[in-house]
Image (cartoon, rainbow, N blue to C red):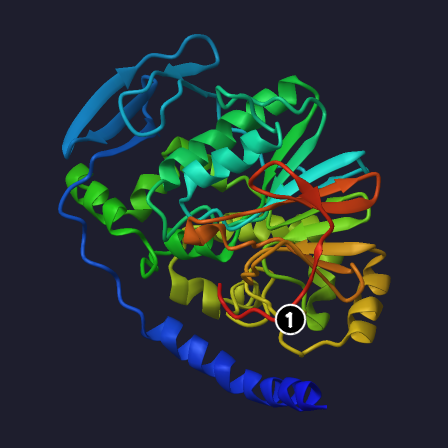
């Protein structure tokens, strides 16, 4: 009985806690730039003659002009990302609906914790000891939020960019789904940017969003990423689908295209324009919604929502959990395992419909039973 009363009390307090968290988020200020950058880069930009690459190494700019070799350009490391990069020609927007595949691995909310991500992927043989794709025809899904907080955002983006090429060559796939922090950085909301990157931007004479502008390789790549991805009967996205937004899933291709066209536009513009306002709404949009975890929807309502969309499950990041967790009878899977803290992280495995989570030591265990979370 005391435990039940305690749970009821916590549920009653939840709206107040959520309001406090929202107020704290809105009150946050942009950090001052770091005093020194040890290593960052490359930032690769498209030019009329090929590509220009820039690094910050020991607080100094290293600049290199790169000539294309056929359809690709090779970028050898100076500092920052430690591996050579093969830059491909710009791609068109990624297809976002695929048939079922026997094995999917998913992770989200990396937030600049590249070393932890590498350790986790190596532990489960997604990549080998040289950080090359090693999982054959498996599909890897990253459900948003590489930007912000941690100190190795650049490295994480280049790893995913490279793994996508390697997986495709092996018959597999790597999908990156945009999160709210991708949209925030690109529309110049820098409240969560690590001070290191503000110093990098200062040294390179650009704003931080301009380092990922339409003329940058990673910026171009981001502008072709989806917000919603459907594989078989599983929907992947960063935040979630509110009941009033089912049409956004039914018109997934149009929804993704609208997001992609809006990336980098001013925040006030995308939040006010009729065709984008609900896509960027801080409470109900697909990149922000938390209604599966805060009591807005009960299990019956979640079941009805998925039935209408003809889905078996929805996999989301955004709301931090201590573990990859199951909610509403495995209908909602939360995969933000708090990698952002730089201490631990987990992977979701979906193998012929069987769900498990992969731990940092390489072991596999059942999904955790979900508990409420507040953090983004």
Q: Which sits in the foreground, 66 or 125?
A: 125
Local secondary structure at mark 1: loop
Q: Which sits in the foreground, 111 or 158?
A: 111
Residue 292 percent across, percent down from the top left:
68, 69
The residue at 67%/50% (across/down) is: 236
In this view, the residue farthest toward the top is: 69
The local crowd at label 1, few if under 14, some if 14 to 19, many if 20 or more residues have their Cα within 10 Å, is some
The residue at 84%/64% (across/down) is: 308
Q: Which sits in the foreground, 360 or 194?
A: 360
The residue at 15%/42% (across/down) is: 36
Vertical placement of residue 266 versus 41, above or below: below
Q: Is any atom of residue 6 visible in this view?
A: yes
Residue 270 percent across, percent down from the top left:
46, 62
Left or right: 55 in relation to 151: left
Residue 268 percent across, percent down from the top left:
39, 67
Vertical placement of residue 300 versus 55, above or below: below
Mark 1 — residue?
293
**Dividing the picture into quarters, in which one does residue 77 lie?**
top left
Q: Is any atom of residue 206 visible in this view?
A: no
Q: Which sits in the foreground, 341 or 277?
A: 341
Residue 338 percent across, percent down from the top left:
51, 55
Left or right: 309 in relation to 293: right
Left or right: 69 in relation to 142: left
- Marks counted in the figure total 1
């Amino acid at each position: 009985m005391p435990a039940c009363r305690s749970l009821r009390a916590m549920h009653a307090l939840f709206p107040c806690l959520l309001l406090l968290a929202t107020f704290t988020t809105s009150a946050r200020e942009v950090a001052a730039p770091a005093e020194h950058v040890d290593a960052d880069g490359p930032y690769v930009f498209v030019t009329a003659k090929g590509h220009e690459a820039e690094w910050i190494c020991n607080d100094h700019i290293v600049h290199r002009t790169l000539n294309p070799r056929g359809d690709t350009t090779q970028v050898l490391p100076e500092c920052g990302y430690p591996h050579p990069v093969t830059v491909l020609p710009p791609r068109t927007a990624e297809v976002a609906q695929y048939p079922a595949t026997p094995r999917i691995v998913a992770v989200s909310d990396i937030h600049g914790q590249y070393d932890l991500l590498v350790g986790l992927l190596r532990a489960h043989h997604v990549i080998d000891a040289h950080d090359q794709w090693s999982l054959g025809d498996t599909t890897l899904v990253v459900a948003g939020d590489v930007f912000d907080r941690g100190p190795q955002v650049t490295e994480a983006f280049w790893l995913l960019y490279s793994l996508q090429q390697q997986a495709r060559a092996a018959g597999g796939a790597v999908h990156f789904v945009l999160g709210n922090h991708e949209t925030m950085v690109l529309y110049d909301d820098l409240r969560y940017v690590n001070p290191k990157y503000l110093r990098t931007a200062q040294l390179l004479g650009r704003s931080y969003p301009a380092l990922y502008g339409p003329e940058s390789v990673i910026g171009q790549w981001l502008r072709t990423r989806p917000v919603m991805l459907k594989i078989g009967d599983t929907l992947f996205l960063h935040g979630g689908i509110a009941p009033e937004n089912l049409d956004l899933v039914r018109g997934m291709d149009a929804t993704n295209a609208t997001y992609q066209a809006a990336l980098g536009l001013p925040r006030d513009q995308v939040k006010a324009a009729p065709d984008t306002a609900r896509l960027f709404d801080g409470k109900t949009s697909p990149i922000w919604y938390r209604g599966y975890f805060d009591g807005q929807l009960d299990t019956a309502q979640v079941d009805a929502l998925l039935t209408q969309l003809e889905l078996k499950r929805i996999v989301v990041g955004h709301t931090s959990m201590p573990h990859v967790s199951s909610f509403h009878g495995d209908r909602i899977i939360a995969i933000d395992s708090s990698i952002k803290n730089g201490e631990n992280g987990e992977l979701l495995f979906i193998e012929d419909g069987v769900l498990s989570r992969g731990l940092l030591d390489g072991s596999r265990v059942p999904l955790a039973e979900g508990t409420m979370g507040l953090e983004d």
